[in-house]
Structures are given as structure tokens and as C-alpha cells.
């Protein structure tokens, strides 16, 4: 099993690892900081380097619990010691969008009781789907205003690895109990200080001040009770 370094440190930009499997352009490592496409968050990009030869990452995906890196050419072999380097600019934007999405969806859930039925983040926008019978632009602007007030509070975001029994004591996580297989003993909880706790394996910023401001760009009805909101971020500084 590959150790997923991003579970504990979302700011790791470079790492050393050993190739544990190489089938053509499909590479597995003993540990990796590259996030595999999942849960509405796109794949990380970047490079794997060996002896000054640079292999560009095309896609990272999960396959039956394994993390598989697809690179742009063959040549990496089992046993090689390699250096992984993230396309950090891309990853950091995705982190800002992901934490921003938690804040917006939690405000909407708290105000309306709506459940999140889908979400997707991109490097320049995001969308969230909710099961909500009614909503209009004005209500939505109110939720966004509230979400932006939360972001402006500079709340600390921490990642906690909690035993299953402990995680399910948290009220906002109870509904997950039926969905997560018993085999998952440790649950990663993303805790936005005093505001929200969610089980999530994605990558997140350390403080809401890094995110910027949410701006709604489009709202759509996607059938009975299903609402879709598109938004983007404005005006956050880039953290070095
Ligand atoms: Zn998440």
C-alpha cells in the first residue's frame, strides 16, 4: 500500500520515494504526495524525476485502494529511488477551492437542511449540488455573504486522524456511519475551527484567510429538488 503523504501534510511539494511497481507508464510508489482524482477534486500534476530524466504526470488515480501515477513516457523501473515534485500552483488553487466548498456547503446545509448531492472543483471554478425544493438568487447571495464572513474570520483548519468510534461522536459525521465500510478504522476529519467538521480525504488550506472570496457565477435547476451553484474565488494572495 502506498503511504498517502497528503493525508497528513497538504503543503508537501517535493518528496523522495521508491518505485514499488512499474507497468509501462503506470507507476506506484511506496509513498506519494500526489493526490489522486477523487471526491470531486481533480488529479494533481507535476513530475517524477530519476537521474535528471523528468517524467511528467499525466494523471493520478485510485485503483482498488492503490494510487497509480500515469506518466508521459516509459523508463521508470521497480526499485528506483525517485523525486516527486508537485505542480504546486495548481494544487494550491485546488486546496483553496476545496476548503471554500466545505464552508459554502455547510452554510447552505445549516440554513436550509439541504444535503450536498454532488460537487466538483476545478482550477478556476467549482460547483455544488443540493437537494433543495426552492431557492433563488437572493437567498443564495445571502448564503455566500455568510460564507465569506466565515472565510474572513481567519479560522484555523486542522486535519485529524480519528478512530472510527471517536469520529462518529461528532454530530456532523453521524450520517456517514452507514456509508463508510467497517473496514475503515481511521477517519480523516477536516476541522474548520468552531465552524465545521467533515470526513474528507481531500487537500485543504491551513487557514480560511488563504481562500479568498466566493462569488456566485451561475445557478441552475437540475430537476426536481436538485439545485446547482457555480462559483469562483476572487482575491486571495498566493502563499509561497
Ligand atoms: Zn472535502
Image (cartoon, rainbow, N blue to C red):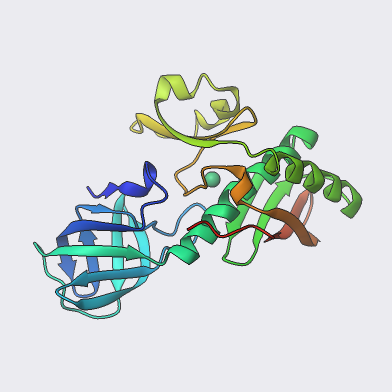
Residue 184 visible in rendering: yes
Image position of 84 (left or right of 215):
left
Q: Is residue 75 shown above or below 114?
A: below
Of 222 and 51, nearer the camera is 51
Residue with the most extreme front position: 240
Q: Nearer the viewer, residue 34 or 157?
A: 157
In the picture, residue 32 is in which quadrant? bottom left
Q: Is residue 53 left or right of residue 156?
A: left
Identified at 62% across, 67% down, the residue is 124
Tell me residue 22's x, y (percent).
Answer: 16, 67
Q: Quadrant of ligand 1?
A: top right
* Residue 41 in sight in this render: no
How many numbered discs, if any? 0
Q: Nearer the viewer, residue 134 or 207?
A: 207
- Residue plotted at (22% across, 64% down): 83
Residue 159 location in percent, x, y? 45, 36
Percent coordinates x, y for residue 136 in the rendering: 89, 51
Q: Name the residue furthest left.
A: 79
Q: Residue at x 22, y 71 (%)?
A: 49
Amino acid at each position: 500500500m502506498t503511504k498517502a503523504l497528503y493525508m497528513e501534510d497538504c503543503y508537501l511539494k517535493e518528496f523522495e520515494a521508491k518505485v514499488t511497481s512499474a507497468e509501462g507508464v503506470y507507476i506506484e510508489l511506496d509513498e506519494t504526495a500526489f493526490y489522486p482524482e477523487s471526491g470531486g477534486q481533480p488529479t494533481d500534476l507535476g513530475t517524477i524525476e530519476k537521474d535528471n530524466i523528468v517524467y511528467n504526470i499525466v494523471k493520478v488515480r485510485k485503483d482498488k485502494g492503490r494510487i497509480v501515477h500515469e506518466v508521459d513516457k516509459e523508463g521508470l523501473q521497480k526499485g528506483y529511488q525517485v523525486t516527486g515534485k508537485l505542480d504546486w500552483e495548481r494544487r494550491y488553487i485546488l486546496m483553496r477551492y476545496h476548503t471554500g466548498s466545505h464552508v459554502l456547503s455547510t452554510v447552505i446545509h445549516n440554513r436550509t437542511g439541504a444535503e450536498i448531492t454532488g460537487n466538483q472543483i476545478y482550477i478556476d471554478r467549482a460547483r455544488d449540488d443540493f437537494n433543495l425544493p426552492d431557492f433563488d438568487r437572493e437567498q443564495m447571495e445571502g448564503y455566500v455573504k455568510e460564507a465569506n464572513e466565515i472565510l474572513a474570520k481567519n479560522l484555523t483548519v486542522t486535519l485529524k486522524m480519528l478512530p472510527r468510534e471517536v469520529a462518529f461522536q461528532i454530530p456532523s459525521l453521524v450520517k456517514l456511519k452507514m456509508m463508510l465500510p467497517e473496514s475503515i478504522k481511521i477517519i480523516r476529519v477536516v476541522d474548520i475551527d468552531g465552524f465545521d467538521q467533515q470526513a474528507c480525504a481531500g487537500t485543504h488550506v491551513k487557514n480560511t484567510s488563504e481562500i479568498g472570496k466566493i462569488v456566485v457565477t451561475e445557478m441552475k435547476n437540475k430537476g426536481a429538488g436538485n439545485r446547482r451553484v457555480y462559483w469562483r474565488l476572487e482575491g486571495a494572495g498566493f502563499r509561497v
